[in-house]
Image (cartoon, rainbow, N blue to C red):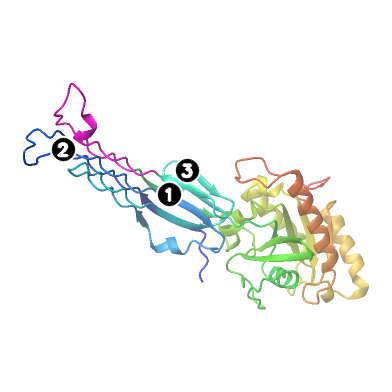
């Protein structure tokens, strides 16, 4: 299934049915009085978070969603039937915004949450509604009230505890495959990952967290280069970022320069995202000669002036992963108790991990 995380749709609630003006006319009852019923209520439009959905593909081509109008009232004291509501089933983590004003109408953060997007119009009054002791033959009636209509933008942000970022071919997909049940595409060429992949990592009995693997970032990503910038929004709800670094690049590139380039793009894209807790995962250590590993890691940490946690792993050989998984779980569990993740990037982000010096301030 194609991954779609943005869509723009038109939604419209139904209009209320018109009221009826009618009088009772039966044999031997020449002055039966008013009996025109009220109109029925128009259908409303609701959004519901569905845990079984993970993409907005259903709304990429179905752009118009309109509820039916309520029935008009009839004589013989008959009220019009109310129209059925329509329900838009959306993935958990979807933000619904007004297309014109950018106002957030709903954020679906929990499964089965139901939110009203457009209210259906109320039915009009029939002349039965206006009967009184002084107005015994009313000829008034009212039309139904119009339903609301909006153009809305749907934006999906996956709900994950941990997000992976790094250059293409840094080993992010191999890492998520090694520690979770996710099975993304893995190949020996850049940009193998074309959309976010989610995996559940088991750290023990009743101990788990969700990790998200995003397409790799390249220089200029914040300005639109590559694919990673399209999915950086999915990191904004995570509690921890894992920066995966290739310690043995095939082209002989400097891992420190590559890491600083990614950090610079992250900061350029969103300052609050840059301030999130971020740990280094020094991957492909099995490709570094054993005699050089310790010196290479020390050199990397020293040049990055890094004070936050870091891990030396080999995702392919599955070395050094257990300690990393346990440390990540402890961090995620502690932050779940202390403070939930922010639901909107306009709010303050979580406190940054302890970094005494900024590695970009050279």
Span colored in magenta: 119-147
Residue at (85%, 64%) from the top-left corner?
A: 323
Mark 3 or 2, nearer chain start = 2
* 299 vs 171, nearest the viewer: 171
Q: Is residue 132 shown left or right of residue 55? A: left
Can you give x and y, in whole percent of width and height, for residue 143 in the image? 22, 38
Q: From this viewpoint, which residue is outermost toward the right? A: 291
Label placed on residue 253: none
Q: Is residue 118 shown left or right of residue 247? A: left
Can you give x and y, in whole percent of width and height, for residue 268 in the image? 64, 49
Residue density around tag 1, few if under 14, some if 14–19, many if 20 or more, within 10 Å: many
Residue at (54%, 48%) from the top-left corner?
A: 107
Gap between marks 3 and 2 measured at Cα:
43 Å
Q: Is residue 165 visible?
A: no
Mark 1 or 2, nearer chain start = 2
Residue density around tag 2, few if under 14, some if 14–19, many if 20 or more, within 10 Å: many
Label placed on residue 102: 3
Can you give x and y, in whole percent of width and height, for residue 308 in the image? 83, 52
Residue indicated by mark 1: 152
Residue at (91%, 75%) from the top-left corner?
A: 290
Q: Is residue 353 shown left or right of residue 140? A: right
Mark 3 or 1, nearer chain start = 3
Residue at (60%, 41%) from the top-left corner?
A: 346
Q: Is residue 351 shown left or right of residue 133? A: right
Residue indicated by mark 2: 21
């Amino acid at each position: 299934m194609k991954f779609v995380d943005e869509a723009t749709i038109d939604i419209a609630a139904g209009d209320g049915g018109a009221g009826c003006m009618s009088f009772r006319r039966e044999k031997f009852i020449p002055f039966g009085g008013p009996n025109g019923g009220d109109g029925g209520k128009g259908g409303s439009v609701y959004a519901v978070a569905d845990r079984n959905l993970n993409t907005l593909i259903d709304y990429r081509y179905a752009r118009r969603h309109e509820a039916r109008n309520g029935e008009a009232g009839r004589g013989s004291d008959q009220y019009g039937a109310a129209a059925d509501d329509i329900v838009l089933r959306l993935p958990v983590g979807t933000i619904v915004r007004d297309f014109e004003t950018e106002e957030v109408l709903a954020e679906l953060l929990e499964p089965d949450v139901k939110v009203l997007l457009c209210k259906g119009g109320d039915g009009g009054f029939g002349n039965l509604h206006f009967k009184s002791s002084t107005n015994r033959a009313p000829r008034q009636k009212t039309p139904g009230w119009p339903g609301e209509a909006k153009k809305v933008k749907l934006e999906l942000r996956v709900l994950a505890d941990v997000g992976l970022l790094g250059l293409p071919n840094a080993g992010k997909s191999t890492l998520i495959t090694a520690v979770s049940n996710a099975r993304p595409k893995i190949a020996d060429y850049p940009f193998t990952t074309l959309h976010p992949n989610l995996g559940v990592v088991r750290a023990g009995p009743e101990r788990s967290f969700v990790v998200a693997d995003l397409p790799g970032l390249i220089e200029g990503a914040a300005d639109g280069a590559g694919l990673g910038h399209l999915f950086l929004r999915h990191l904004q709800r995570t509690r921890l970022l894992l920066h995966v670094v290739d310690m043995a690049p095939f082209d002989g590139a400097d891992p420190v320069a590559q890491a600083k380039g990614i950090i610079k793009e992250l900061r350029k894209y969103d300052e609050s995202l840059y301030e999130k807790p971020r740990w280094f995962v020094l991957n492909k250590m099995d490709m570094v000669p054993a005699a050089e590993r310790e010196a290479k890691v020390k050199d990397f940490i020293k040049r990055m002036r890094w004070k936050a946690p870091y891990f030396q792993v080999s995702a392919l050989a599955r070395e050094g992963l257990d300690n990393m998984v346990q440390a990540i779980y402890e961090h995620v569990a502690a932050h779940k108790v202390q403070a939930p993740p922010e639901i909107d990037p306009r709010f303050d982000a979580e406190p940054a991990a302890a970094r005494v010096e900024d590695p970009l301030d050279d």
